[in-house]
Amino acid sequence: MIRVLLLLVGLLLSAPLQADELRPGYLEFTEKTPGAWTLVWKAPMRGGLTPQTQPLLPTGCKVTGEPSREISGISLVTTSAVACRSDVSGKSIGLSNFEASQTDVLVRVQPLGRPVQALRLTPAEPNAEIKAKPDRWQVARTYFVTGVEHILFGYDHLLFVVSLVLLLSGFWTIAKAVTAFTVAHSITLIGTTLGFLGLPQRPVESVIALSILFLAVEIVKKRPDQPRLSERIPWVVAFGFGLLHGFGFAGALNEIGLPESDVPTALLTFNLGVEAGQLVIVALSLALLELLRRFAAALMHPALQIAAYGIGTISAFWFIERTFA
């Protein structure tokens, strides 16, 4: 059990280098007139992609003219005109030199007069087939998986949920707090994505780090006979911080991109994916705590303290990095 705890602490301490770095690339292939396409390649500069990672067009398609390039946020966006001699159905689209990447790439294909196709490229599968008749659930499935991955590998959001579980006692208390967090970040995620709300991303990311540090301090100072503010009204605290985390989710989704004709579907399923990933985190955390209670009850308190100090150290590092770097 001690070895398991040390392994968990080691994993936590390795997380600062990867905080909230799940930023998939985005490849959009749109037919403007018969045979004339526009290719937009949005490559995150911190996503593990190299300059050699470039789009592979379907057979019979080639770039015409000089591509335009611009920096958008933390991504390099390249726009190219493409001419295709024949229908692209049944042909593949993909990326070259993608196998060593640490990120995935979402692909949106919009043939003229036909449904949008949402595909996903991974280092293991760097090519995907453009279907003649796309699956109606493509967009939903693609953005649901992206949402799950963002909460599981976006370590600041993950640590906030874990901290809630470590701080609170009782299934229903945890359920209410997590539900409040869910409702709050859903409000700001949807509002920001649709253009009704907005905050500068850098300060938001700094305050998100502070929210995790706050919970870590609360765990360290937790006393059975003296419940703290976050224990007395955990749903209020979770709701308030959830609003900020929603801006963080929206920033990540903005970096990924949304298919213009499928925004409601993509937004809904991304949010559902985030919640599914969140439930996995809660279930695993509760399972680990239950194992400690049953088989190593004497280690429960030191384990919580070790985890809290580890989380606090990580979040303090993130705050400094995001504020002053």
Image (cartoon, grey):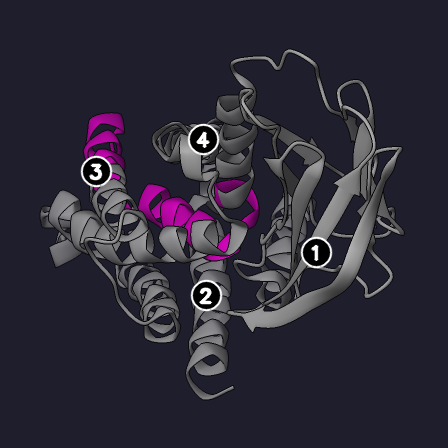
Task: Residue at the far bottom: name it.
Answer: 324
Q: Main secondary structure of the magenta part?
A: helix
Residue type, mark 4 in image: Gly
- Separation of marks 4 and 3 at Cα, in angstroms: 14 Å
- Check whether the beta carbons of the residues at disc 2 and disc 3 lie within 8 A of each other: no
The secondary element bearing badge 4 is classed as helix
Of 290 and 147, nearer the camera is: 147
Q: Is residue 238 left or right of residue 124?
A: left
Question: Badge 3 local density, few (<14 within 10 Å), some, or many (20+)?
Answer: some
In the rendered picture of this protein, how many numbered marks are placed on residues? 4
Residue at mark 4: 273
> Residues in magenta?
151-180
The secondary element bearing badge 3 is classed as helix
Q: Earlier in the sequence, mark 3 or mark 1?
A: 1
Residue at mark 2: 309
In this rendering, which labeled residue sits more in front, label 2 or label 3? Answer: 3
Q: Give the residue drawn at x 69%, y 40%.
A: 36
144 is higher (above) or lower (below) than 106? above
194 is higher (above) or lower (below) than 251? above
In this rendering, which labeled residue sits more in front, label 1 or label 4? Answer: 1
